[in-house]
Amino acid sequence: MIEVQHLTKRYGPFTAVDDISFTVDKGEILGFLGPNGAGKTTTMRVLTGYMPPTEGTAVVAGFNLLDKPIEAKRRTGYLPETPPLYPDMTVREYLEFCARIKGVPRGERKTRVGTSMERTRVADMADRHCAKLSKGYRQRVGLAQALLANPEVLILDEPTAGLDPKQINETRQLIKDLRGDHTVVLSTHILPEVSQTCTRVVIINKGKVVAIDTPDNLTSRLRGSETMYVQVDAMGADAGGALAGLPGVTQVAVTDTRDNVVGLQVESEAGRDVRRELAAAVVSRGWGLLELRPMRMSLEDVFLKLTTQESDAPAPSDVVAAEQAEVAHE
Amino acid sequence: MSNVLAIARKELKSYYSSPIAYVVLGFFALMFGFFFYSLLLYFDRQSMQAGGFAGGPTVNVNEQFLRPVFLNATVIFLFVLPLVTMRTYSEEKRSGTIELLLTAPLTDLQIILGKFLGAMGLYASMLAVTLIHVGLLFVFGNPEWRPVATTYVGLLLMGGCFVSLGLLISSLTKNQIVAGMITFGVFLMLWVINWIASFMGPTAQQVLNYLSITDHLDDFTKGILDTKHLVYYVSFITFGLFLTARAVDTERWRG
């Protein structure tokens, strides 16, 4: 549905986006993840035809943005970083204007505006001027505008920015409901959002793609080894030493101690589940097993690892993530 | 075309839903009314004096009253039109709504023409205000209607030049005040540029006279429709809109 190839965007001497390539299949929700200034907004602006790329091509809904921008734009809904509202229009007037310029047929405008307002829960403010809306409503009116023409492709720049927790959940649900019929590209710096809503993630840093994968794969790939957290009431005995001797366990580190209770981080060979052995070892010694859980690397850790790497990221590919994982592991 | 009209409607609506349209129209009506009244007093005295002598000079309402009124009124447009055009692009760039327009399935030309027509709509409503005064003249006097009609044609074209130039300047900056000030300066320059014409050589004189926007209005107010002036105005407007399109496109590439 979206094909980006060797896209580069320079502002004067500054390179905002540096040779990135990725594709988005129909019905996917792609998360664009990166620190501020990584080039997320620039990439989205290129994809929506707001600005042409310096180099490279972008094809949206089958239309190259350089040859057939109007056709591509007709099939794209876009929510910019700041919702583009006209302060002196009411929400309804604004959406009707948007429907008109997006080429929604005259007979359908009223119903489209209505359903769009329903979906984004702004119908109660339909006759309020945009200037008088709260940040949360402004954001959702912007989203209503993007959904208006029922476009195949939706490009949402931080769709949940400025919303309260309840609205965030509603908006995420709305985006999830779009999956299948619509192809969605969204940017965010809220990590749980990505793991909750996206089917794939592109992590971008300093204008370069550092990883593309599913949220699950990213977190497991970067782990490299399995890590368990074990909390034991060892009654003064050396729990760490005992567990380190178990088959498959590579390393044991004490993370916290309180009275007789010891918290341990147990690393084992990759792919080997040592939970049963750990439990058996603790119980057979007559200690109390207070807690035993796998430590998964959160997307947050993945993100930090990938974007705070000192060394230059090599060519963007799926392998990158694995390579960087090794570096991180050493 | 429907896209152009959608933009034009939006522009016109935004003038009328903010104080801009009312301030502009109110100020214009006040100034035009004053010009009309003071020149009427002057014309009144002239015709009294002319009536004093039998077989003396005759007076002409069109030549001696309406013409000066409208030529003076162009000064008001000079002041007011920058206020109308300065926000057209600047405001959209500042508030980010330009992103909506540029990512909608619209061509740059449709957006520019829409904005041009929107501003022309407000300008036309200013001209509509003057119909009240001219109407009164037809009720109480006996002016010729042809020179009046050509005057309106000329005024519409002259306003078109101001608007297309204002649009161009607004497309170059994010700042409304800067846009307004530069627009005003350029208008003023184009208005007075032929003042020095009589001190120049014959070629320079011709060029300077040709450049003056208001100079071309003169024949229209006399009731003359000269293709020379029509070509000047229409090409001025087209060139202004063309440069605006280039400016918008350049901005897009630069990012």
Image (spheres, helix red, strand yellow):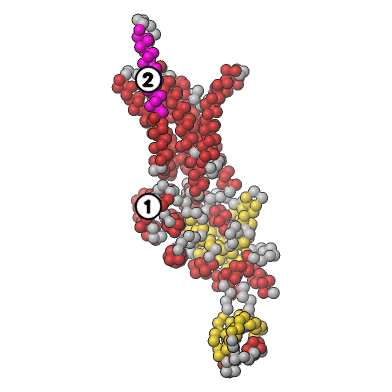
Q: Identify which residue is drawn at 59% across, 54% down.
A: A57
Please name whichever residue, A268 or A244, is drawn nearer the observer in this view of the structure: A244
Which chain's residue wears label 2? Answer: B
Query: Which residue is the site of mark 2?
Result: B40
Say which amino acid is labelled 2. Leu
Q: Identify which residue is drawn at 52% across, 69% down.
A: A192
**Nearer the observer, disc 2 or disc 1?**
2
Count of marks, rendered view: 2
Q: Identify which residue is drawn at 57% across, 70% down.
A: A299
User: In the current view of this chain or complex, which residue is farthest to the left?
Assistant: B139
Q: Quadrant of residue A20?
A: bottom right
Whether residue A131 is visible to the viewer of this picture, yes or no, is: yes
Which chain's residue wears label 1? Answer: A
Reply yes or no: does residue B118 show up in magenta: no
Q: Identify which residue is drawn at 49% across, 35% down.
A: B82
Mark 2 element type: helix
Query: Which residue is the site of mark 1?
Result: A128
Neighbour tally class for label 2: few under 14, some 14-19, many 20 plus, Cα within 10 Å = some
Whether residue A71 is visible to the viewer of this picture, yes or no, is: no
Q: Position of residue B18 (x, y in %)?
A: 41, 42
Question: In the rendered structure, are the residues bearing label 2 and label 1 in contact, judged by CB atoms less than 8 Å apart?
Answer: no
Q: Which mark is residue A314?
A: none
| Extent of the magenta region | B31-52
Please name whichever residue, A253 or A329, is drawn nearer the observer in this view of the structure: A253
Mark 1 element type: loop
B206 lies left or right of A115: right
Q: Is residue A68 above or below residue A326?
A: above
